[in-house]
Amino acid sequence: MIKLSEGGAWLLNGTQVVEDGKDAEALLKSRLGYVPDKKEAAEHTIAYRILEAHNTSGNMEKLKLKFDKLTSHDITFVGIIQTARASGLEKFPIPYVLTNCHNSLCAVGGTINEDDHMFGLSCAKRYGGIYVPPHQAVIHQFAREMLAGCGKMILGSDSHTRYGALGTMAIGEGGGELVKQLLCQTYDVNMPGVVGVYLTGAPAKGVGPQDVALAIIGAVFANGYVKNKVMEFVGPGVGSLSADFRIGVDVMTTETTCLSSIWRTDEKIEEYFDIHGRKEEYQELNPGAVTYYDGMITVDLGSIKPMIAMPFHPSNTYTIEELKANLMDILEDCEKKALVSLDGAVDFTLKDKVRGGQLYVDQGIIAGCAGGGFENICAAADILKGKSIGPDEFTLSVYPASTPIYMELVKNGSVADLLGCGAVVKTAFCGPCFGAGDTPANNGFSIRHSTRNFPNREGSKLQSGQIASVALMDARSIAATAANKGYLTGADEIDVEYRGPKYFFDKTIYENRVFDSRGVADPSVEIKFGPNIKDWPAMSELPENLVLQVVSEIHDPVTTTDELIPSGETSSYRSNPLGLAEFTLSRKDPEYVGRAKAIQKAQKAVEAGSCPLEAVEELKGVMASIQAKYPEAGKGNVGFGSTIFAVKPGDGSAREQAASCQKVLGGWANIANEYATKRYRSNLINWGMLPFLIEDADTDLPFQNLDYIFVPDIRRAVEKKQGEIKAYVVRDTLKEFTLKLGDLTDDERSIILKGCLINYNRR
């Protein structure tokens, strides 16, 4: 079904793959008549050409990228604009779209959510942006319909910023990286590796884009095959897929931990742009005649079957057929994974969902940037036409990804078919993807065509003893399950005739509601602030020496950003740095906030010019141990704060708050064996936090939770670009160990030295 090359691979004329190895030179010579230069052939990828066109450094090994457009939603744009305003923002220099698809319900926290929306509208007017009101479109669908263009690059403050199927290299990052673009700075990254995804054949009937995506994720996530690389989709199988199908696969590439994605383009993508009234944005993109990739994923589309990703990660994949054949064994494995993911806080089982040998689910949802596409919902409606989902526990909700899609589904009768079977059709909203809508009952099991199924991401609260869980599936199999009244059913198990209706895009819907400044700023517009919108607190520069207390120790194989700062109910506080910080690690380590605040008192004392040892009594013994070896430490040259250890933090969302909340509470660093994504590490740096690495010593760390760590001369080490940092565990004596900082650009070092990106831009 899916094959990974062991090394690099050559693609010849878009149709022949030659893997690196002992026979590669002979094969290349027999087919080409010569052995091409590997470095030169690597420059023939689509990705290389797009990156080269957007690079301002003159050095393709050290990229400094400027993007064509930016996009954010309503739980990120307030913080981004507030940061940029604090740094001197006067005008959006490139098109910046502010969508309102996360806090759309305006149902939690009084006026908070709509206050944020009014802030966004006033900023779009003042600084020259575009404002998309709630319920009009989810962020990524609007970007596909109105922003994407072949050969372009888009940066978004949401991890699923992926428009590669439309020929656009798009990257999801934390807000700090968008702030840099708003201030005419660059996105700095080493030239990423490029991995080919060679598609052959065509999908079988009933197989949808989520099935293909989950099969790929299952093959590459755990081994890091595409981590921080670009996935480039090529091969004859691309032509067998519609634009909508490609989009549905592409958006899920985020779950592989790749940096970005790009696809070759053809007449189907040209038709997509034509339908949306933007034909001028199309150009044909193909790799060169002889192209070298850093790896190759070969996917036989015809062999892929309906898939399911069981709790609690998109990579926990099985075919539905396999799950049914080994039901109790796989459910037992889910319980073992839950012991790790949930820390044994609640009892978790899905075995009680087995009825008469079949797996019963409580809820189905087709939604958002992954599931809410036109073809997905039409296919679901075809399956459910004339059927009933039944009057039992099972419910089905469908969220079209934009109002234009919704309108067309109304016109072609799909909405009537869905409502007629007992489903509920709602407006464009991202809530089911992050726990702000359709939370199941306690012990509920939901199947969703959405992006993620991390623990509690469906909205349950572990700290309140609640647990529900999500499995990811394609809309077609969700509809087949709904037609079977909640008993798990693959779409390949039913007989249905898919209509495949043509899509017609009505642009007047946006013309009637979306505010578009067309790049014209109006400085006379007053920004509207609600009472929850707060400025960032002042942050100190990196001190000469650091005393860090370890206030949380996480030994899960991967720690998601949802665990660092929960989604769902916290969303209303994204505009309030201090209010949001109270939720930091609340699901994973409820003691974290109190511990971080306790040691932060010492740093606040330093900043106020008083004695830190009086603020935190325990530090008297700590400093006595330190001064036995470093007698000069403590004379106005020591900063105090917290750090956490996690094996591999930062999988999942791009939300910068996973880092900024730690900083607001006095965090100076993270210590990790590795960072799950570039975007989380970048978030730490942009908030002035040291992204320390420690050798893979998860089970034998030199420190324990609540230990103090002394890092002498840390400021000088950052200034002098030291790769290895000497540190000490402080007990009665000092126990030395080594930390590493990894690769940092000069600008990143300056940001850390200044204390955060805001301070850096005030220099």
Image (spheres, rainbow, N blue to C red):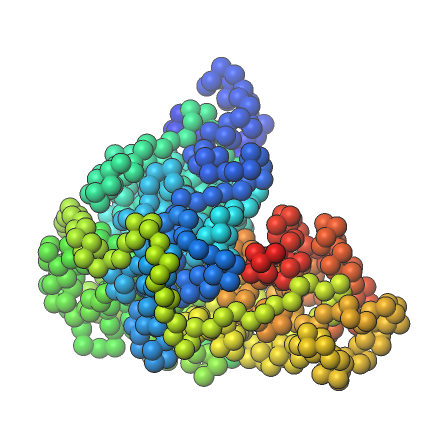
Q: Residue at x 53, y 21 (%)?
A: 36
Task: Tell me residue 462's x, y (percent).
Answer: 46, 78
Farthest front residue in view: 524
Res 574 visible? yes
Q: Is 55 on the left or on the right of 366, as rendered?
A: right
Q: Is residue 50 above or below residue 305?
A: above
Q: Residue 407: x, y in percent?
A: 15, 57
Residue at (43% x, 39% y) in the render: 232
Nearer the observer, 576 or 326: 576
Location of the C terminus by quadrant is bottom right
Q: Position of residue 155 (x, y in %)?
A: 43, 50
Q: Residue lying furthest top in this view?
A: 33
Give the side of residue 445 with respect to residue 653, left or right: left
Position of residue 135 in the picture relative to residue 650 (left or right): left
- The picture quadrant where one finds residue 104 is bottom left
Which of the 4 image quarters holds residue 446? bottom left
What's the residue at 50%, 66% (across, down)?
657
Q: Depth check: give the residue in front, 223 or 229.
A: 229
Residue toward you, 566 or 182: 182
Lateral position of residue 254 relative to residue 104, left or right? right
Residue at 75% over, 50% down: 720
Residue 338 drawn at (x, y percent): 49, 71
Locate the N terminus and report the quarter of the image it occupies: top left
Image position of 254 with respect to 569: above or below: above
Q: Is residue 495 visible?
A: no
